[in-house]
């Protein structure tokens, strides 16, 4: 695939993909553990995922800069 997104949107796109993936996995596991395997599982999972992604996406955008700053203080960078 040819790149199409301007570089200034990289942080937002990263947050969108990361939050979408993580909320999909976590909501799926939580839904499975709470309701078990049933015919309703896909619909329950989709509802849980959409609700959690709405919270996860802005959270990642707000929290990521703090995490980057913290990591810059605790990670030893290799030189050269």
Image (cartoon, rainbow, N blue to C red):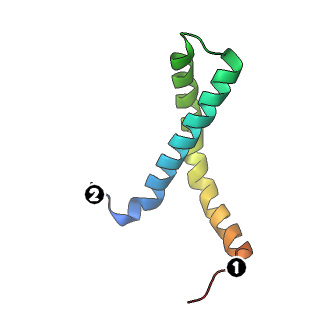
Mark 2, secondary structure of its residue: loop
Query: With 79 as the anchor, is 33 left or right in this view?
Result: right
What crowding class fits label 2: few (fewer than 14 Cα within 10 Å), some (14-19), or many (20 or more)?
few
Q: Residue furthest left?
A: 2
> x, y percentage for residue 25?
58, 36
Q: Residue furthest bottom?
A: 80
Measure the C-alpha gap from mark 2 to mark 1. Answer: 34 Å
Q: Which mark is residue 21?
A: none
Residue plotted at (63% across, 83% down)? 78
Looking at the rendered image, the disc whose residue lies closer to the viewer, 2 or 1, is 1
Query: With 73 as the anchor, is 47 left or right in this view?
Result: left
**Residue that label 1 marks:** 76
Asked if labels 1 and 2 touch by Cβ distance under 8 angstroms, the answer is no
> x, y percentage for residue 1?
27, 54
**Residue that label 2 marks:** 4
Precedes in sequence: disc 2 or disc 1: 2
Task: Pick the residue in front: 39 or 20.
Answer: 39
- Which quarter of the figure has residue 66? bottom right
How many marks on residues?
2
Mark 1, secondary structure of its residue: loop
Task: Pick the residue in front: 21 or 62.
Answer: 21
Which quadrant does the C terminus fall into? bottom right
Residue plotted at (51% across, 24% down)? 46
> x, y percentage for residue 75?
70, 74
Residue plotted at (55% across, 35% down)? 24
Q: Residue furthest right?
A: 74
Query: With 6 as the anchor, is 18 left or right in this view?
Result: right
Q: Residue furthest front?
A: 37
Task: Pick the residue in front: 25 or 8.
Answer: 25
Q: Is residue 56 above or below residue 45?
A: below
What crowding class fits label 1: few (fewer than 14 Cα within 10 Å), some (14-19), or many (20 or more)?
few
């Amino acid at each position: 695939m040819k790149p199409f997104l301007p570089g200034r949107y990289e942080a937002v796109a990263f947050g969108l993909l990361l939050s979408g993936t993580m909320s999909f996995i976590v909501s799926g596991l939580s839904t499975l553990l709470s309701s078990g395997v049933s015919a309703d599982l896909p619909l329950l999972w989709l509802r849980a995922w959409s609700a959690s992604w709405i919270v996860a996406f802005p959270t990642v955008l707000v929290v990521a800069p703090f995490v980057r700053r913290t990591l810059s203080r605790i990670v030893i960078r290799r030189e050269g």
